[in-house]
Amino acid sequence: MPFTSLTARVLFTTTSLCLFISLSKKGYSQEPVSDTAVQAIPLQDVRVTAFEHNRRLKDVPAAVGYVRRSTLERFSPTSIVHAMNTVAGVRMEERSPGSYRFNIRGSSLRSPFGVRNVKVYFNDIPFTDPGGHTYLNQLGYYNFNSIEIIKGPGSSLYGAGTGGVLLIESMNGLEQPGVMTEYATGSYNMHNAYGSFTAGNDKVVTRTGYQHQQSDGYRAHSAMKRDVLSWSGRFRFDEKRFLKTTFLYGDLFYETPGALTRGEYEANPKAARPGGFGFPGSEAARASIRQRTFLAGASYEQEIFSWLKNKSVLYGMFTELRNPTIRNYGKSSEPHVGGRSVFKFNKDFASTRFNFDIGTEWQQGFTSVDIHRNINGHPDSLQNHDEINNRQSLVFAQATADINDRLTLNAGVSLNTFKIRFQRFLPRSLGMQERNIKNEFAPRLAIMYKLDKVSVYSSVSKGFSPPTSAELIPTGGAINLSLNPEDGINYDLGVKGRLDKELTFDVNAFFFKLNNTIVQRRDAGGGDFFVNAGETDQKGIEIALTYPLLKRSIAGIAADQSWVSYTYHRFKYDDFKQLNNDFSGNMLPGVAPHTIAAGYDVFFKNGFLGTVTYYYSDPIPVNDANSEYAEAYHLLGMKIGYQKIFKNHYRLKLIAGVENLLDERYSLGNDINGFGGRYYNAAADRNYYAGLIFQWMR
């Protein structure tokens, strides 16, 4: 039976009343719950692996954001979008349920959908394919335990990508054997079910999980269904050998309603794109995405000598994609394989600790793409067939010196090679075409000085990003093998630390000069094509603060935290002329100058919890001419719950929440430079959810 708005209001009001009553009682307590324990760990003391440092977040000489499990649990257990947007400098969008778009410092310029120009690793495995695409939406909500976000170029160690790097881990080192089941339901006939089984001991831990998620969506023709089956293992053979294994199968389907013009958006934001310019509407074309992915890989770490370690990764991945659109029907098969190996040397010289990393990464893809005529969502006559072979490789080296536990010096460089061989059949072959990009150097220098409570750092790095295979050979546009790679120099200056053991802060300022910026265009039929846009200037300030507002001074509070993230981005075209249009000096489309994310979390000793979240976005230019803007919006959310542990083995948790409490109309995921002014993808209005979690711990 659908979860109606009336039912949601009744449940939310009832739970709120229970929370109010519980707060009026004194002296009732139970042992602390896991959420409280995680929340109590200061964020700056979390250990991260960014740039192979494996040290506390506050000791890494780089701008790094961190999303942990407790961050994800502030929101609905169906999407990571709002949690990611709590990180300063990060913007994640959902054009329709299941259709993710992710950028760091404005890199969505190249992303009509999906994730490009950001390198992603999942359990040490390169999740970004050699063609430059990342199917981040193939991962379910429960596949994310922690996410490290390197802001700005990470090319010196991770290769192609000027936008940044994501390091995702699906498990932590404190997994407890047992069984967990979770069910949530909500507005728009949303249902989310998850079950996992964890087994093992202090040396071996394995977890098998399955998630099923479905929703009718807010807009017409925006239904979504996702099934994810995963198995992860952590094997510690002894103190010198450690193995991580990852197997994942994902089956994702979602309808794509298409972008609306300003008039259509204001008249009926729930509508799907109508037909026009000789093309059918989204519903008539049954526009959608069907994605199946299988991933298998392993990461093995061993200590060879006391001063030498190695971590090696091998994996294989296969993605099958079916994509009926208003202009055609695309069918692709995308297998690829790859590996990564890093040798780590360490040595102490008097008061200096020296670390040296050297390694390589290699990926090879074999993609075939068939483009058919689309007849009511079914493939008809073949229009063309493409065979695409991608190869991407890099070698890298990095040296780090920690002097007197105060000064850290870091220098790294990578040498990158990209090759694509392409052949199109119409149905006869057009001949083999090839594009090679060789010997691209990407250096990085960083310095950090640590005071008692504050660390100051600065870095300069070169970013390098070749065009993706979808940009060179777009299914909706002409082949453009002459498209040039982006490259640029980024400067960072930051300060982070913790004052009085309570207030944590991370403030960063950056300037990025990007050359040959790749921007996206869209034709009447929704087809994408890409051009180089000359130079862009990207300046910004990113601030993150956390503070336990009540400091547990009120009886009954186990832990609490207030937090705020502020982003200022001033991104402009420095020199961009196209035909008779001069866009020099204009704001880059898709980037909000100011955004704010803030909230307050509180955990009570009697098991109740509450979270209030807020997000603000400035108006966003949606085209290069800056002639139209998506309006500013304010998002307010609330979540409350109750959790109890029985006999140290059983955990029961109830949650209820509301998103977009102010019932704002806004577009989350605009189609940049959409043909005919089709820019807007309306996001959900006020909506509710509720869930139940049961866990048995051995």
Image (cartoon, rainbow, N blue to C red):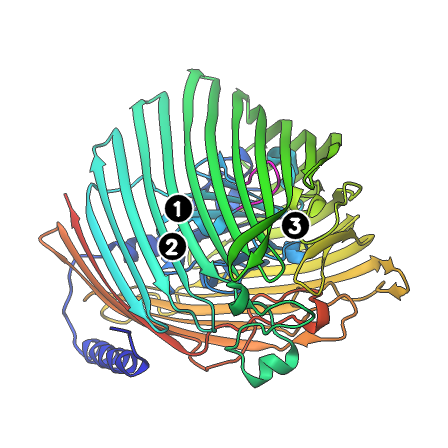
Residue at the location (63% across, 59% down)?
327
Residue 303 appears left or right of 531 = left
Mark on residue 318? none
Q: Which residue is mark 3?
A: 475
Q: Amino acid at mark 1?
A: Gly
Q: Earlier in the sequence, mark 1 or mark 3?
A: 1
Disc 2 secondary structure class: strand
Of all residues, the one furthest to the right in this rendering is 580
- Label 1 neighbour load within 10 Å: few <14, some 14-19, many 20+: many
Are dots 3 and 2 in contact, CB under 8 Å? Answer: no
- Label 3 neighbour load within 10 Å: few <14, some 14-19, many 20+: many
Q: Which residue is mark 2?
A: 226
Disc 3 secondary structure class: loop
Q: Can you tell which quarter of the image residue 469 is in?
A: top right
Q: CA distance from mark 2 to mark 1?
A: 7 Å
Are dots 2 and 1 in contact, CB under 8 Å? Answer: yes
**Is any atom of residue 608 visible in this view?**
no
Residue 481 appears left or right of 169 = right
- Label 2 neighbour load within 10 Å: few <14, some 14-19, many 20+: many
- Quadrant where the N terminus sits is bottom left
> Toward the viewer: 34 or 503?
34
> Toward the viewer: 23 or 5?
5
Q: Can you tell which quarter of the image residue 223 is in?
A: bottom left
Residue extent of the magenta highlight: 128-134
Residue at the location (35% across, 48% down)?
228
Q: Which residue is mark 1?
A: 250
Q: Amino acid at mark 2?
A: Arg
